[in-house]
């Protein structure tokens, strides 16, 4: 490719990146303004006086509780999903038994089940075991719904792991549990990072299950809490902007630090040896 071609390519990519980043920058500036600047001033101008108190206002009003609920529920669900899916894929791909294809097919059926079709059965089940208005109902649901897609991503990577690694470990006296936790899991770190980000995006942004199973404010996550908060502060648009910035910040941070791992994991899981 000629220099002109590279120049045009970089200019195009730069413009695409600008269009991608601009809404985030605009939302951040929006969150630092008051109502007068938002409605009477230039919507694209910098704030005349930075209103950091907008963030303090929403944090003291209860967003902090929703934020921490989202963090721990998301993290616990991710850890359980990665652990269970890794165990399932290890058993399906590395062991020989008659029903491994059938079990894999049952997991893949989960990809075809719409979320809304399971709301009533799940609500009835959690009601019978006293898990309604309990955050563990959300953790269980997130873990179950993320298992199929996580297993599907892990499959391609597990097929590329040489069986000689396991054979050498067994010859050295490694038990099955030691083989899995000390050898296989560390090898699959790149693809686990990819699936963790995918699970985080789903868990962090999920609305329907939390809105259905949780009624107490002390257990609500950020997505549902924002709905109540926006209704309460409908006249304070700067505070609403601060709330939205807080809600998207963890996703942006995760992508910033793990973007290379995401690409590496997707590339590795796409190759089947």
Image: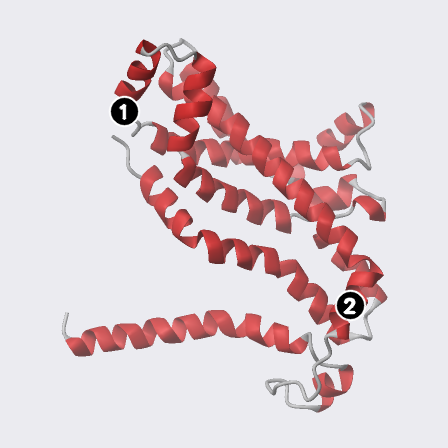
Q: Tell me if I can see residue 36 in this picture.
A: yes
Image x and y of residue 109, in percent:
51, 28
Near mark 1 (Cα within 10 A), the count class, few <14, some 14-19 or many ≥20, is few
Name of the residue lying farthest toward the left: 2
Q: Kindly identify which numbered label has been placed on residue 202.
A: none
Q: Residue at x 63, y 49 (%)?
A: 204
Quadrant containing the C terminus in the rendered view: top left
The CA span between labels 1 and 2 is 53 Å
Question: In terms of secondary structure, where does tag 1 sit?
Answer: loop
**Left or right position of 155 against 82:** left
The residue beneath circle 2 is 56
* Image vertical order of residue 260 relative to residue 167, above or below: below
Q: Tell me if I can see residue 230 in this picture.
A: no
Q: Kindly identify which numbered label has been placed on residue 162.
A: 1
Q: How many marks?
A: 2
Image x and y of residue 176, in percent:
44, 13
The answer to whether marks 1 and 2 mark residues whose Cβ atoms lie closer than 8 Å is no
Q: Residue at x 42, y 15 (%)?
A: 100
Q: Quadrant of residue 37?
A: bottom right
Image x and y of residue 259, in percent:
43, 54
**Left or right position of 40 against 17:** right
Q: Quadrant of residue 135?
A: top right
Quadrant containing the N terminus in the rendered view: bottom left
* Image vertical order of residue 18 relative to residue 266, above or below: below
Among numbered discs 1 and 2, the one appearing first in the sequence: 2
Name of the residue lying farthest toward the front: 172
Image x and y of residue 103, in percent:
47, 18
- Closest to the camera, between mark 1 and mark 2, is 2
**Left or right position of 44 against 239:** left
């Amino acid at each position: 490719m000629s220099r002109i071609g590279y120049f045009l390519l970089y200019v195009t990519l730069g413009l695409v990146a600008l269009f991608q980043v601009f809404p985030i920058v605009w939302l951040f500036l929006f969150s630092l303004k008051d109502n007068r600047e938002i409605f009477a001033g230039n919507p694209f101008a910098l704030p005349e006086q930075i209103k950091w108190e907008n963030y303090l206002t929403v944090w003291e009003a209860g967003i902090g509780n929703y934020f921490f609920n989202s963090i721990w529920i998301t993290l616990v669900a991710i850890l359980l999903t990665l652990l269970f899916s890794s165990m399932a894929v290890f058993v399906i791909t590395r062991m020989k038994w008659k029903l491994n294809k059938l079990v894999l097919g049952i997991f893949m059926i989960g990809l075809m089940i719409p979320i809304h079709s399971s709301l009533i059965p799940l609500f009835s089940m959690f009601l019978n075991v006293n898990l309604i208005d309990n955050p563990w109902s959300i953790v269980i649901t997130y873990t179950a719904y993320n298992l199929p897609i996580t297993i599907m991503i892990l499959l391609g990577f597990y097929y590329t792991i040489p069986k000689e690694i396991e054979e050498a470990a067994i010859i050295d006296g490694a038990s099955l549990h030691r083989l899995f936790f000390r050898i296989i899991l560390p090898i699959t770190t790149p693809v686990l990072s990819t699936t963790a980000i995918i699970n985080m995006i789903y868990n962090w942004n999920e609305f329907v299950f939390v809105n259905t199973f949780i009624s107490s404010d002390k257990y609500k996550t950020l997505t549902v809490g924002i709905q109540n908060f926006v209704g309460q502060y409908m006249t304070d648009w700067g505070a609403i902007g601060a709330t939205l910035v807080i809600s998207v910040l963890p996703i942006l941070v995760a992508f910033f630090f793990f973007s290379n791992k995401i690409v590496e994991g997707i590339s590795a899981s796409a190759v089947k040896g």
